[in-house]
Amino acid sequence: MASGSSYLGTDTDIESDSSYDEKKSDEGNSSDDQDLSYNSQAMQFLREYEEREENGSVSDDLMSNLDVTKFLQEEAAVETVDDRSKGIQASSKAGVTSASTSNPAGKEKGIIRSIFLLNHMSRSEYASLLNDFVESELFVIDGDSLIMEYLEEKTLHTGQMLHFFYLVECYLVDLINRGATFVIVFFQDAEHLWSKCITVLSFRSALILHLQRNTDIPIYTEFPNFLCSTWQSFLKTSYPYFIMVSDQGLQMGKECLSKTYFHIFISHLLGKGVNVALLSGQTFDALRVYGYYIQSNYHIRRFIKQHKEKFDAHYRSLIECLSRPSSMASKCIHLDIENKVYKTSCQLQKLWPEGSCIQKTVCILSCSVILQLHKSYLKEEGTPSKTIKNKGEENSTQENTLSFEEAVDLCKLYCLHTALLLHLPLSKRARNLSENGKWEDDVSKLLEMRRNCEYFALKHLTTLSNWKIDFTHLPDLSDSLLLQKVGLYWETQKCKDTDVQLGEEIEKEYTRIWTAVSKLVDECEISEAFPVRNTSKVFISSEGSKKDEHREAFLNVGLIHVKSSLLEEYAGDALDSLPFLTNDDPLVLSLTKSKEFDELFHWNSMKPLSDEYDRTACDNEKPSGPKEARRMLRNKQKYNAFLRFYGQSLEGNISKQIPTNRKEDALIKSKSAPNKTKASTQKKKAEIIVETNIKKKLIEKEKKEMETLERISGNIEMEIRENINEGIQKLQEFLKTCSCDSVKLSAEVMALDTCFSVWVSLCSGPGKERCFNVASTIMRRIHIILDKYEELIQKSHREKIAGYLKDMGFHNLDMSVLGHNKKQGINTKTVTCSNYAVGIGAARFQLQYMSHYLKREERKDPDPRIHHFIPDTWQRELMDIVDNNESAIIVAPTSSGKTYASYYCMEKVLRESDDGVVVYVAPTKALVHQVVATVHNRFVKELPAGITVCGVFTRDYRYDALNCQVLVTVPQCLEILVLSPHWQNWVKRIKYVVFDEVHCLGGEIGAQVWEHLLVMIRCPFLALSATISNPEYLTEWLQKVKNYWLQAEELQNSEPSESKSSHRIKHKQKRGSDKKSFKVRLVKYGERYNDLEKYVCIPEDGSFEFFHYHPCAALTVNHIEKYGFPSDFSFSPQECIKLYDTMVGTWKNWSRAKELDPEQFSSLKDKIIITKADARKYEESLKKELVNWVRCGHKEEVGKVLKSLQPEIEDVAEHDMKKLFPCFVEELRKIDALPALFFIFNIQEVESYADRLYLHLKKKKEEMKPDTEAQLSLQIKLEKVEKKLKRLTNVTEDKLSASKAEILHTLLDKKNILEMQVEKLSKDPPECTFANQKAVDEKTLNYMLKRTQLLTRNIRLALPLLKGIGYHHESMNPKQRQAVETLLRMGFLQVVTATGSLALGINMPCKSVVFVEDSVYLDSLNLRQMSGRAGRRGQDLLGKVFFYNIPLPKVQRLIKANVPKLKGQFPLSVSLILRLILLAEKADDKPDAKAKALSVLKHSLMAFNQPKKQEMLKLFFLFSVQFLVREGYINQEGKPQGFSGLATHLHYREPSNFVLIRFLEKGLFHKLCERSLTNKGGKQFSETVMETLVLVLANLFGRLRLPHSAVELKGQFRHSKVILDELPPDFAAAAEEYNDVVDKIFGSFLLSTSKFADMEQEYQLPLSNISFAGAESDHETSFLSVLTNCQNKTTAVSPFATLSGNTNNDLFCASTVDTIGLQTIDAKTLKIPTFDHETEDIQGRKMPLNAYALDFYKHGSLKALFCENFLHRGDAFQLIKDFKLVISSISTSLMELCEDENDNVVLAFKQLDESYKEKYEKIQN
């Protein structure tokens, strides 16, 4: 939550928001505050509360200002419920009991629900709820909220149970298909919500029973309420990811009370620290579900905790009110029904002991109980409490009640309806709502009683265990419309029963049911099954017919012929089955015929047109004059200097000069080649002399280094004895300066001797185990000596090492060192134990105490292609791939070195020519800047004028983008170039593309762009990632793409066209001798260079304890059985030992215990040097053994092992972990775990934590009371010395006498000493700063501060920065981010708080990574990416990951979740298709352009190996082309025309781009501008026009949805409007016209796709897979033909949706498509370009738009946006920036497309662009 205090003290915004501050101040002093509504005052209170809460100064006085007991608007309604109606209160709508009453008291002030909870709900983030790792991320769905959401779904007809169940199952399946793991909870108290609505109560009971009996979803019904201890325990043990809850109430009389219930529930969850996802407003795409997510934070938890008693008391009073019966009469009736159901079920069980299906059972019980009770009520005539009456009918007579015979007839109809349910196939039950019926009032009362009976019957049947009831078809318990149809048949047909032919099966079934009813009510005389009707009373009357002629007309849609080679080649085979219009059809004749679009020049004025590349800001434009040229040159020099500096901070100075490779150079080389052999023979003697001299120099150098060693060895020995770690570090520093191996060996032997002497002295005292770090240091020295200096080792060295090993108790190793055969060695049984023995075996010791020091598998043979390091085997494979021009998918852990292949690729292309290009595609701008700096640091090359080595292109900025050899860009920008027709010649120059972090292909945003690029590029590529679980699938897909390009190449080469032949010749000449390869290889490497260990942090008495978290502690037996171990699940060697010991301790009789003992394991036994690879083999064996235990039935033992590995700690208690954060960082410093990255997923908190730590250090320094007196005394002395120096320096030194000169030098020395003393006193003590002053010199630090202008523009960042504390997030200035990154890499910063901006590939080496707070964005993908920052290669051997304030269940799920599988999104959109057509039609090389377009269309990852989906995509393409033709973007020849350029410029804003153009074409903007032109000298438009213009654009391009609850806060804000107004009427009408066109075209598309549906599956419920297809009857009676007659077609609609009267016509309304479409087509994933200018949820509630764009235009304040518009500060800035870019793009396009430069619309948009840009620049600066 963006709290009100989040902007306090933010200096960056002070200047730009001064007007806002003044306005706020003025309002604060105004007397108008007295007139504010209570809501406004409460909003002000809430902000004040949060500000004080942030500062820790919330007082009881402040809290007492708000009466929490009045937090519900409906409280008065609760208190006055007793005064409401008595008796049963029936509603004509499905028996809903009315309880509504006007309540003025409910409007009184004190409404916390409207200000506290609604404020937090309105601030909820619209986010992807499931992210990428949800198979283990458990969340909870509140069952009653689920019922609430789908009970009033727009397409559901009241009482249609089977359709309701279908909707619920569809939703649950949508979640499951996206990987969700969840449970559903039904609280017992929640049943009272529906106590006055018996229909819903019946549905609820049936749903619970169905989910329990017919699905595998865990259903919890044992919790009495959400206050009970069992629920609290469930929350603590399972820690759900979030809980899905409704935020609304049922639209009925008790609406307020049900909403109250859910709001209290939400408050309870947030107070318990559980996050909430709102069920309303959720949307789906192919991979994810999006919804409103409310994150619990400390402010909410504290507020609710303080008022817990009041919240709980109000909840209890609410439940008491809801559970209170409306009258004593209704209570008695319910008791009667319950008792009768129990007795009758016992009788039925005796009658049918073999059992029956649930439908017949409930039908018989209901009818039997109704008739018995109705008979008894009629006998008790005149007893009000027993008479079924509506409110106000107490005085009515018995005549208004059904007679017993009439009740019998009604029950017969219901029994016949049940028989029909059992035998009618679903296909015959489609309802035609043109003939609706309405039951008479007295009939409705009896039907309501039937619902009561149904509810109690279900409730009772669940308790029976000795009676076989088939619950399979429970969802089809009743069909209210079918019952109406049966009733209407007897009323409208006026036929006799003898004329009705039910059909043999139905007749038998009906007779059997009615016979059972007759036997159960034998005390009442009832008629036989036939005739069905014995009475003449009218039960139901017809309401007439309703026909939607508008939608009916849509069915008559034909297609327009379009001549296009692209269309014919891609989808020509799909055209035959589609209807087409003739050329003389009015629709064809009315098509807009515009001039053909030329993307380079305007069709009439011939003005040059720009594209998105041209419009991107550029820093290397041509200078306007000499002065400007000098300024640009200086800036360029500064920029290049910084890039080199930045690059050196990444890798050091490894710059490489790339030689040119031009023809002249080749010619010179070829001329000099013949003399080469001769010259070499002549130089042979000289070479010998040189070699002799080199040897002499080496001997001299060795002598000097040995002398140095002898000189410093004493100091090193002393350091080792005092502090072994610091001593070894001194040794390492010497070894780095030493080049002679013999000297290094001597130094190592010296260190070994000293370390062993330390061990000997320690072993004589107690606590030997505590000194195992000394023993491990000894073994490390032995490993190094034996591994690195094997050729130099002498016999004496070996004997010494063997002796040390023997003394340490490693008798199995000492003989191996001496080279003796083990059989000749000493018998271990006779070995006496040395006093210096470590007491454990050698293998166990190395694994347990040398875990991260074990030798890595590193090659020693250099590769001639690489000079500054020796590549591993797999890295050499990558270089071979690049050398062979092959493509590769590279999957390797973070920090493994996979990125090096991309730089080798760059070097190869740079060496080959001056025109080849490598494109490096990075997912973020931060990574782009890092790669650019790395390229500048690595490569230097002399190039022809106008060409550079490296260029950059992002949406904000470009530099040398098209005249460089290495382009670093983001995917969206490369797509712009690849799809732009006039940049295709540049595209052909691309030799290689590197896709970094290619797993973004499955990401939430921009995934399709990655897919488009991968299928469009002809050249080879490298795709890098650390987190893909199905790389084989990805490789197979991309190999298919490359095979396509191989065929395309062969096809183009075979074409006989002369022009193409000449083009190919030029192309071949340009490429030279390059050999093409279309092979895609997969390279997988699973080893991290360093180990990662995880720790849980627990506060303990003002300090912290760190508990090691073993990876197996995260697993469960079920998880191992179902998933096994995740693919990247690894242990450190120490963790392997712990697992083995736990397995041995758990199962005493384990048969393989000895075999897997470390001392006996084949890869470890008797090895002096155990490698990481050996340890990995041991780890894999332990994993396989644990899995084998599960498979062999030893689950109990596995469970004990896993439990034993879990740390014995309590979960993090309710501490204010934010306040303890400084203490936590201090503890990390004590254990040498800094530098560290602290990840927090909230920008405000990122800065807040850094600020808190800085204030802690500041306070700490103040408490130390520095010696100010001594500092002042020194300062006075220094001033006196400076005065004397000043007098002396007035005279030149050569004129000074010798004595004065001596005095001068003395004073200078004294001055230096005093300055050093003053500086020492003024400097921060080490404990008061985290900065490493030695890492960065003052000059470098000042350069960084000056470049970023931190001291003048962002003192909030500068002050912590000087203390070694930084923060990093995407909303920071890029220069500031780079400064933080650089200073951390250089070692100056030790603490950096950050968002996910550092997750993707940013090189930020640190010892530790800390996850500070839980968040919806903290999933296992981010865990893996962010954890990879710890212990980068070359920095640390061990990385540490700390979980600070993350609940243990969340830690468990994060660790055990697997890496994601890449799946494709829906790949096409109308805008993309228009761009592909533009490319194919306007590119110079049309065959190449068409091949690219076809590749995009044919190679969707979503449709890979799925022919039906491929055919569906063809239809989507065809109907999209139809849309483009009808809207005038292309003509019938397939040529772009009209505004197609503007539409493609705004392609990322579909469908708003098309709606904008419709507004332009209809002249709406002209009308707006003409009405209010000021015409005072120039064309300036009034503020009203500008605001209306922004309102329209905000509705189009600022579409940030708020939850429906935000509507209730409308008008409660001081500065922002917050809720955006709707479009002006004329614009709204035009938008509706646009939607009509879309509905017509894409409704027809949905009709056409129905042929791809799996109809067998369509007749099954999607989750339970229960089929309702039924068997088609050969003989259809007249009764059935009337009953099943549906005039409208339903072929493209779900059969379940037809039960509510939905037909094909309803597909022409986009808002209903998602829920009524065929489930196997899954319309949710389709990108139908409907413009939802009035977006509604599934219940038709409006989801308002956030007015941030218009609000910012009015007040220009960023503060107001994140204070009032529910936006985080970083999000607010980015949204305003994006909106500004949209306005600029539209303005530029209009200026280029319009001939008249003085056109009103052009001028209006220009004025708006300038005005908005001015406001934006103020907040930017």
Image (spheres, grey):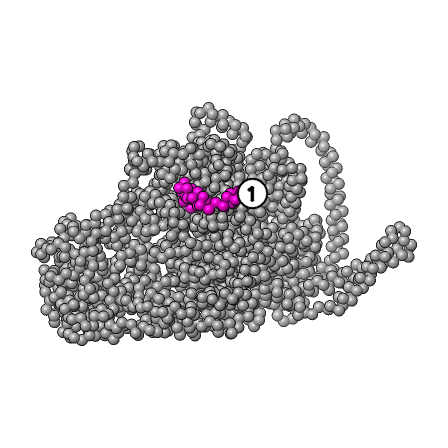
Estimate the x, y position of residue 375 in percent, counting from the top left. 14, 71
Residue, disc 1: 617
In front of the other: 739 or 592: 592
Label 1 sits on what residue type? Ala
**Quick one: SS at disc 1?**
loop
In front of the other: 641 or 76: 76
Question: What residue is drawn where x is 54% and y is 65%?
Answer: 29
In front of the other: 844 or 1210: 1210
Above or below for 625 versus 8: above
The answer to which quarter of the image holds residue 438 is bottom left
Estimate the x, y position of residue 497 in percent, counting from the top left. 9, 57
Find the residue positioned furthest to the left.
498
Above or below for 1489 versus 410: above
**Magenta-drawn segment:** 1552-1581
In the displayed structure image, the side of residue 1096 where residue 1732 appears, left or right = left
Estimate the x, y position of residue 162 in percent, counting from the top left. 26, 57
Question: What residue is drawn where x is 53% and y is 56%?
Answer: 1757
Question: What residue is drawn where x is 23% and y is 53%?
Answer: 433
Prevailing secondary structure of the magenta residues? helix
